[in-house]
Image (spheres, grey):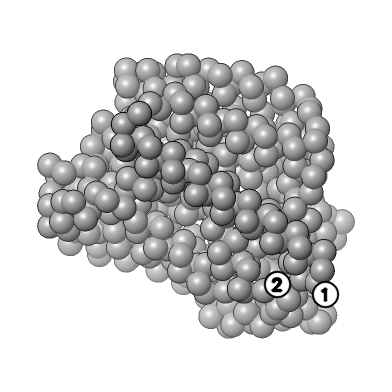
Amino acid sequence: MNRDLLRDLSAALAAALLVTTAAVIGTVLEHRYGNLHVSWPPLYGHWEPHVGPGTPAAIMVAVAVVAYGPLLAARLPWRALLCTVWGTAMAWTFSLALVDGWQRGIARRLTTKYEYLQVIDPVNRFHDIPAALRDFTHHILIHSPDAWPAHVTGHPPAATLTFVLLDRIGLDGGAWAGVWCITVGATAAVAVLVTLRALCGEALARRAAPFLVLAPAAVWMGTSADGYFAAVAAWAVAFLALAVTGHRPRSTGLASGLLFGLTAYLSYGLTLFAVIAAGVLLLGSRRLRPLPYVLAGFVVVPAVFTFAGFNWWEAYHLLVTRYYQGAGGIRPYGYWVWANLACTALVVGPATVAGLRRVGAAPLRQGVRTCLRRSAPEPRLALLVIAALLALLAADLSGMSKAETERIWLPFAMWLLAACAFLTRPRAWLTAQATLALLLNHLLLTGW
């Protein structure tokens, strides 16, 4: 066994120990004090071994990707690879969701008392959208009249408006909402590949492709609105990467700005994607030309919502108060500040943990100046992954992400998966990723 592989396995073992420690200490805390508000710490879910109609499909997708994924990723034409990644990511996510059955796994996920569709059915509180936006901040605090459900409260209104608009065009109900989140969410893997190719070269993008498909994160991508948010944020970064590398800088820069603006109105926490955007700008060879178009696109969504009467800053400050009125004020920071990282280890899987170990050494070996050269693709990828990791750590230290980060941090997790491009023996690591995802989905009934 070579030294690098031994270190990779040691990193994966350390992550397993972190998860085990979080589970043991979390169980003790929850039984003794009841202050974690999760049934199976550190994850939001409970123990319920089960199989379902998605079980055979999930196993078949996993076997196919392990057996043929690395080969196809290396040989398919680029556009065919992108289509294959999207289709396979959808198949993997749908099959995992269907382990819980159609109703429990997809159709009812976004209709519970905490979710977005509660404001549409049985009473549509967004029948007058401008009035709902003007009145939005009046229903954020927990004791306010007709307080919004938790997820509506916890996000800017673009998140809820997505499902309102789906309802308006006839795609109403939890089933269509779930299909939307999975279908759009699966494109996040494609966006990451587009970014990697633009900034780090096609070879590394192809090596990352099977891992972006067969990620344990898919357990929570289906069905969670955060999977949809992850895709929007990923495409914002992808268009920025294309713009700063000279690929139609006007149109791609404008598209990037529009999507970054939308991202900020889907989730307050995704403003931390500014860290990833800064990493992309640092790696870009033509940074200045697209910036006016990026900025012009960025102001559009905030301007529309502000003109409609929604005040982002006021809503955010009210949300902070609301957060501490609920479970956020009870859940102990001293546990979750490190247990969140255990959640992340489960979301990204042992392969990503091993890849992150290799990421940490690349810039140190090469030096930052060398990393910025186009002729140094691996250090460039390392810097991009480090930017995503820094954004995630900032979210962690903020104290506004105590528990449920397996869902909340999906947008950041997609970029950590890119670290798997550094690994050798991809089939063995893909097997580990698939095994973890299948075990999680079949042993636990997750909240999403």
Depth order, front residue of 265/384: 384
Within-10-Å neighbours for mark 2: few <14, some 14–19, many 20+:
many
Left or right placement of residue 419 versus residue 47 in this view: left
Amino acid at the residue labelled 1: Asp
> Closer to the N terminus: mark 1 or mark 2?
1
Q: In the structure shown, which secondary structural element does the residue marked by tag 2 occupy?
A: loop
Residue 413 drawn at (x, y percent): 49, 50
Query: Residue 78 lies in what quarter of the image?
Result: top left
Residue 400, horizontal then vertical, whole percent: 59, 72
The one of 133 and 65 positioned closer to us in this rendering: 65
Q: Which residue is mark 2?
A: 331
Decide if residue 358 is on the left or right side of residue 212: left
Tell me what residue is drawn at x 62 percent, y 74 percent. Answer: 333
Residue 362 seen: yes
Q: Work out whether residue 372 or residue 34 is closer to the camera in this orientation and state it.
A: 34
Q: Position of residue 398 (x, y in %)?
A: 52, 74
